[in-house]
Image (cartoon, coloured by chain):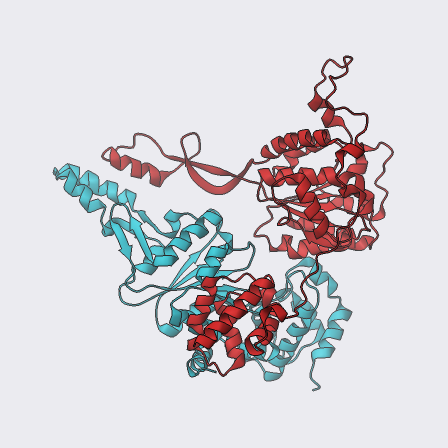
């Protein structure tokens, strides 16, 4: 039995080392379960361990390999060579360099303003400052603050859930009766219920391909602030591959997160296969959502190297499943821009709201669309 | 294989549920260790059915709690029967009874409406099976509440005191993974992932459910489904779809798969327009040819 316990502990440690979250509690469950099964039957032991250790479907493969190596082979857990996903090397992409001093240009956010503009406020100026222009570190802090405020305004969706309210709302007959008991059965006041206000579900898809380089920093900042205000927002990045960023995005400081991001997103500033990435997003995330409640926001210039038909199909599916599909295109702020990219053009009929996202003001106009 | 598990497998089958060793092991462990069983898997693989057959096997009541967004404690646990309480109060007043006596009486079990969770822990004679269906659809708050009930099977009602389960229910929770469940809940349970059935298992399921189906048809339907699931589909057909389709084919008196009939009845299997569109008559014909047995 002590041999079993030792093997179990080893397996648990190996699983944790390979990112399969098992806890001591799970190991105790497994220790309870093992005496109940036929220990001579290899498959039965493996099945029982999967069940008691609560191994998720996605981790079955890793588990099976570790089971073979550690449980049966008696290998040291550290010696097991299960291919772990290598974190991609940090690319030296331009968009990810953080050097406010070097990139500082003649914007002087701190200078006491131009007298010609009576309505001048640093914030108003900030709002209209295109993203392609260089921003100073101080600008970014101010923008972050503004964005956080915008994001808070998003929390306006009303859920189906009813909660008691003192104000207006639907009469709650049962609660009214309950209250009437206190006044010996006289209905003095009516109890009411109203729909609770819920954080919106938003999924952000950020295009991190080369053509979006100059914008991605600001769009990321926007997504980050959103995540802080609406913890249920999910963030994905895509170029040639789709990466789920939500877990990487600690709602801490933007600067830190950007560095971590660089490590998580392969092929930063590379090419784009929007269609394939959106299709994967639909399949792996959106289709798995309980109902069509998610507002999907795609931040991309639509310059695609993939198959236009695939893009159209993916966009159609996403729109069918989402509460709303918003496509933000930073190039739209440029008067010379026509959505000429073939895929983009074809996908437009399936986009609920196609807008520009070249400065803060344009992002601000977006808020009502996100609130769902 | 442990004889008990072997036996359970056979009993499940005789009750009309074709299980595999993983399912039988999970049910056996959950029953013996007295832990809730969390069952995940695609829609239509028979998660809910498992709880039903379990209740049937043990000859006990199945209590079902269907989860949805907005599910609250009044619907899930208990509620006082206010209209009846009021009525009683008025009657008491009319008869000039002691108000305190009346109050004591209207807050007794007699005026308590038991909702599924409470019913599951107040069963007098034996442990029922409590099915908490689609727990992923309830909100996080409810999940936390459920965790509390599941951890010690007792409920405190302010007016009555604490009710403890004499026979703790056997709990089965199902999830389609529309939302990742909280870790705490998952850890509290044993975990079973139900896969789509293997070819052999699926044929046995068809034969068990529709004994009238010709053996050849059952085999061809099984193979067709296996091939179909390998395609990239928006919505993979589950066992429920297989059985519907088989019934349709039986109604049309088919003894074997015919391309035209398959095309006409494909709606039983594929429930997404895009999926249906990929199945052109030529495509169906070639699929049918690949799974058909020489006559």
In the rendered view, tell whether residue A112 sits above or below residue A165.
Answer: above
Residue at 72 percent across and 48 percent down: it is A262
The residue at 48%/83% (across/down) is B1
Q: Position of residue B189 (x, y in %)?
A: 45, 63
As drawn, the chain in red is A
In the rendered image, which quarter is residue A338 located in? Answer: top right
Q: Is residue B137 left or right of residue A32?
A: right
Quarter of the image where the C terminus of chain A is located? top right
Nearer to us in this view, A188 or A310? A310
Q: Is residue A5 above or below residue A266?
A: below
Q: Which chain is cyan?
A: B
Indicate left or right for B183 with B101 as reference. Answer: right
- Number of numbered tags placed on the structure image: 0
The residue lying furthest to the bottom in this view is B295
Percent x, y for residue B54? 41, 71
Task: Please identify the quadrant where the N terminus of chain A is shown.
Answer: bottom left
| Image coordinates for residue A270, horizontal then vertical, percent | 81, 50
Q: Depth check: A280 or A309 in front?
A: A280
Does residue A316 show up?
no
Instruction: Look at 36% across and 73% down and name the residue there.
Output: B58
Q: Nearer the viewer, residue A365 or A346?
A: A365
* Residue located 66% across and 59% down the image: B272
Residue A136 horizontal/vertical position (percent): 75, 31
Q: Nearer the viewer, residue A57 or A333?
A: A57
């Amino acid at each position: 039995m002590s041999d079993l316990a030792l093997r179990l502990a080893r397996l648990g440690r190996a699983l944790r080392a390979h990112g399969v979250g098992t806890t001591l509690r799970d190991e105790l469950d497994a220790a309870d379960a093992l005496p109940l099964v036929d220990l001579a039957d290899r498959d039965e032991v493996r099945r029982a361990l999967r069940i008691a250790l609560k191994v998720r479907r996605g981790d079955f493969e890793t588990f099976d390999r570790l089971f073979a190596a550690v449980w049966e082979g008696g290998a040291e857990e550290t010696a097991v060579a299960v291919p772990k996903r290598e974190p991609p090397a940090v690319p030296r992409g331009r968009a990810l360099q953080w050097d406010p001093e070097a990139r500082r240009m003649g914007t002087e956010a701190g200078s006491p303003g131009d007298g010609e503009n009576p309505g001048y406020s640093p914030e108003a100026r900030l709002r209209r400052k295109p993203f392609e222009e260089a921003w100073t570190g101080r600008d970014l802090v101010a923008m972050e603050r503004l964005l956080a405020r915008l994001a808070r305004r998003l929390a306006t969706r009303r859920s189906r859930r009813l909660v008691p309210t003192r104000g207006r709302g639907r009469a709650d007959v049962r609660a009214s009766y309950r209250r009437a008991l206190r006044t010996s059965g006289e209905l003095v006041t009516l109890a009411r219920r109203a729909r609770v206000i819920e954080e919106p579900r938003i999924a952000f898809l950020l295009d991190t391909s080369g053509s979006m380089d100059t914008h991605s920093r600001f769009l990321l900042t926007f997504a980050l602030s959103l995540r802080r205000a609406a913890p249920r927002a999910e963030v994905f990045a895509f170029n040639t591959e789709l990466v789920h960023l939500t877990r990487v995005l600690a709602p801490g400081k933007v600067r830190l997160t950007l560095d971590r991001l660089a490590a998580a997103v392969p092929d930063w500033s590379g090419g784009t296969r929007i269609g394939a990435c959106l299709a994967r997003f639909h399949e792996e995330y959106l289709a798995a959502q309980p109902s069509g409640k998610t507002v999907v926001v795609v931040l991309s210039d639509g310059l695609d190297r993939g198959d236009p038909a695939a893009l159209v199909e993916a966009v159609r599916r996403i729109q069918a499943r989402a509460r709303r599909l918003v496509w933000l295109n930073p190039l739209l702020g440029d008067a010379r821009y026509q959505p000429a990219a073939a895929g983009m053009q074809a996908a437009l009929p399936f986009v609920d709201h196609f807008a520009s996202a070249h400065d803060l003001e344009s992002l601000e106009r977006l808020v009502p669309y996100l609130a769902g | 294989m442990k004889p008990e598990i072997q036996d359970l497998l056979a009993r499940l089958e005789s009750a009309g549920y074709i299980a595999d060793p993983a399912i039988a092991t999970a049910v056996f462990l959950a029953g013996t260790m007295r832990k809730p069983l969390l069952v995940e898997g695609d829609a239509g693989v028979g998660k809910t059915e498992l709880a039903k057959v379990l209740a049937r096997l043990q000859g006990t009541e199945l209590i079902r709690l269907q989860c949805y967004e907005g599910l609250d404690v009044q619907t899930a646990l208990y509620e006082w029967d206010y209209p009846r309480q009021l009525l009683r109060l008025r009657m008491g007043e009319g008869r000039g009874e002691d108000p305190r006596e009346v109050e004591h009486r209207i807050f007794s079990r007699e005026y308590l409406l038991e909702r599924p969770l409470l019913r599951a822990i107040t069963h007098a004679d034996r442990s029922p099976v409590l099915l908490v269906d689609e727990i992923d659809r309830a909100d996080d708050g409810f999940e936390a509440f459920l965790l509390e009930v599941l951890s010690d099977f007792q409920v405190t009602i302010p007016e009555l005191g604490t009710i403890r389960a004499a026979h703790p229910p056997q709990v089965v929770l199902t999830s389609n993974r529309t939302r990742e469940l909280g870790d705490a809940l998952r850890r509290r349970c044993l975990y079973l992932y139900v896969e789509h059935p293997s070819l052999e298992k699926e044929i046995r399921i068809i034969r068990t459910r529709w004994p009238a189906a010709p053996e050849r048809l059952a085999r061809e339907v099984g193979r067709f489904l296996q091939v179909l699931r390998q395609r990239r589909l928006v919505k993979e057909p589950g066992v429920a779809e297989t059985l519907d389709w088989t019934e349709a084919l039986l109604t049309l008196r088919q003894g074997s798969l015919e391309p035209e009939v398959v095309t006409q009845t494909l709606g039983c299997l594929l429930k997404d327009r895009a999926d249906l569109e990929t199945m052109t008559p030529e495509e169906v014909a070639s699929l049918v040819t690949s799974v058909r047995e020489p006559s």
